[in-house]
Amino acid sequence: MNNELTLKITGEAGQGILTIGSVLCKIFKNAGFYLFANNDYMSRIRGGNNFLQLRISDRPLYTLRRDIDITVALDSKSVNMHKEDVSRDGVIILDKKNFNISEESGMFLDIPMYGMAKEIGNELFVNSIACGFLIEMIGIEFRHVDEILRAAFSDKKEDIIKKNIDAAQAGYDFAKDNFKRDTFKIKKGNAKDTLLITANDAIVLGAIAAGCKFYSAYPMSPSTGIMDLMAHYAKKFHIVVEQAEDEIAAINMAIGASYAGVRSMTGTSGGGFSLMVEGLSLAGMTETPIVIYDGQRPGPATGFPTRTEQGDLAFLLSAGHGEFARVIFSPGTIEEAFYLTIKAFNIAEKFQIPVFIMSDQHLADSYRNIKMFDLNKVKVQRYIISKEDSGGIKDYKRYQFTESGISPRAIPSWINDPIYADSDEHTEEGHITEDAGIRTMMVEKRFSRKMAGLSKEIEKPKAFDVKGADCILIGFGSTYGVLKEAKESIKSRNIGFIHLPQVWPFPATEIIELLQGAKKIIVVENNAGAQLTRLLRQETGIKADKSLLKFDGRPFNLDFLIQHIEQEK
Amino acid sequence: MPEVKDLKTNDEIAWCPGCGNFGILSAMKKTIARLDRNPKDIVFVSGIGQAAKLPHYIKCNCFNGLHGRALPVAAAVKMANHTLTVLVSTGDGDCYGEGGNHFIHNIRRNIDITVVVHINQVYGLTKGQASPTTDLGYETKLQPEGVILEPLHSLEMAIAVGAGFVARGYALDLEHLSWLILEGIRYKGFAVIDVLQPCVTFNKKNTFDWYSKRVYKINDDSSYNPQDKIAAFQKASEWGDRIPIGIVYKTEKETYEERSGINKRPPLAEEQIENIDIREVLKEFM
């Protein structure tokens, strides 16, 4: 055994899967395990089937597996739905009597959890019973359960806390008395002092550290978590978090706040971003810095509201009428999401452009426990005329022509001169013009000159063992984890791996160098259009040998990827 | 503080000769000169249309954004720096057509900005189509059989949604209009002022003559109480042989700034952001 386990908790929406999931994650972390957890939920509040998939080990984990070692089924429907995913020695924990299941199966582990819960006082305690049972199976001491449950239910009455702990104890004791196998007892790691966090959380923390003071958005999965957490910290860090009437307002508000001198951000998913596109173009034309978060989910239209895809790449590359400079970051890990968010704010302000942080549901909502961020690496660089320096400014021109294409940016009321910003083609002063010569120079300023500057600040691709590799895997965004683990797992061949944390401007020079003499190139993407494969060819002339595509709304898992790569001889 | 002549810019004015907008521009400059504010502390936001060009002709800050989108920009400028005076110059197409949703929701926000809506009952910049306020039956190139949609009753709508300052001015009565805009700016909250502004090129019905015969000042009549919502609603709905101008409705309301508490802090724009310490909040994830 690889010293790892994959678990699944499954039931109807409304049965508390999220709560037990969060409690379990904390228990595992507290006990020293590294974990990767992902909620698979339907776009509904009650009923249906939701599950939490959780992988634990003594070493850091970056992705999910396909086969499940222990499945906890909280309703009868879950048993049939998830039977096929059970691993070779895997089990399903269920309550046969409550679920009306008479069938015998080697994989069933029958616990009268509903009966036990009713004895304690309420069927809802079934979660805590299952939790206690699992913990004992895996070999975790009960004190961790006690500690975490107390913290998790700290806002509840003492009676409720006590009953939950009693329920967990009952589950724990039941496992001890009735389940005597050591199959699932695995070695712990030293992950106790880690951060248990999602990429959405990390992006909020990065934005706060980068000085974001204004966030306007309209709720849309999977970006809503960003707005919620931002609102949670709004008071503490003096941030205005505004729920806009629509995404059009959201992006225009972010632009307005930025014009007034505030670092601002908006966030949405593909559908909402469709509404923001004109505003994106406005940011480009008025040279107003903003950071835009796109948590991708499968489209077109409403698509799969709660699932994952990397289908917006081509859209973000070309969104907005007219030509102007932009940057698209595509973080692959929670750590990268944090540091690139800070870079996004600095680059947006330096170049006075819109900058994207492109994520997807899988990266946005998956939990991992990671090492504490290195806060020494957090550098907020300002690129505005400071209030102190503003007094001496005379004959200010908002769009003054410069070599870099970047004009010194003044803040309204700090300088004595008026600041004109305009969505029409404009003069250096910001007034409407139809002059062909000025037009040409303005396009060069907003587009070519800024792109030239941006190409010097590209977040470099991360490459692993590409020299001499039999096969090089390339990906962007959330596939980082699964590609990394697949590369490490495949021993039969030399596999190289390149991850792109920035897709625009495209790191063409670096990629051409890295792919020199490559024997085989496979681009792995969570979309149907092979969008990264096309971008690679457009920007470098390099044609990948294969695009490994998945567009069923679910993320790649390690076993699926290994199997497919091994087929590619 | 500036005089009217100091507020002139060198930008060439792109309106038709005789356009009602010249009156609004003069009144606006007069207001700013009376306002006792340095123009550097005033931000003029506009969208697209003939009205949206106005800020280019006044020497104070300007954000000339997208069609229909002046209000979200203006609201956010105020949120980012509540010490600024924020004005919006917009038209009936910009504010009530393209940007209708923002109008409704910024009334709900009740942020302290002043919105001057140029009402010429026709689209000027796109050459003469009906606007949301065009009278029923009015014939245009695009509506050759006459307009069949009812005109939007913008002032009634504003009162119904909850605006605390609702007024109507007339582009030819500069002194009255300047007073209205000044009152709008001094009002704490979202102030909307419709300004009747004849389009000399495309609107052959609602001309200077047409309006001048009809408009009358409601605030000259001491029996009219603009705080009486029902009376205000009746006044706002008056449109025909007589068209009321003046402050139609006025009531005190808590503003966005007060409700959110941003008015008690220095402007967001002045927050120091170089060394924000997130160590304490990281503990929540431990």
Image: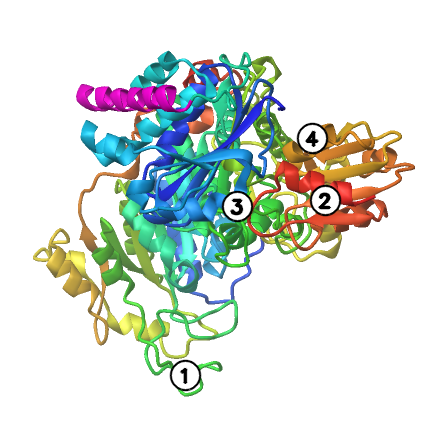
* Position of residue A174 measured from the top left corner of the image (x, y, whole percent): 33, 23
For label 1, the residue is: B139
Q: Residues within 10 Å of mark 2 (few under 14, many from 20)?
A: few
Are callouts 2 and 4 both on one chain? yes
Please identify the quadrant where the N terminus of chain A is shown.
top right
Residue B83 can be seen in this image: no
Residue A406 lies, in percent from the top left, at: 68, 35
Q: On the rendered structure, is A314 left or right of A513? A: left
Residue A252 within the magenta-colored segment of the rendering = no
Give the CA distance from mark 4 to mark 1. 68 Å
Q: Is residue A87 left or right of residue A173?
A: right
Q: Are marks 3 and 2 on the same chain?
A: yes
- State the mark number for residue A84: 3
Question: Residue A66, can we see it?
Answer: yes
Q: In the rendered structure, the residue with mark 3 lies on which chain?
A: A
- Considering every residue shown, the one lying at the far right of the view is A517
Q: Which image quadrant: the C terminus of chain A?
A: top right
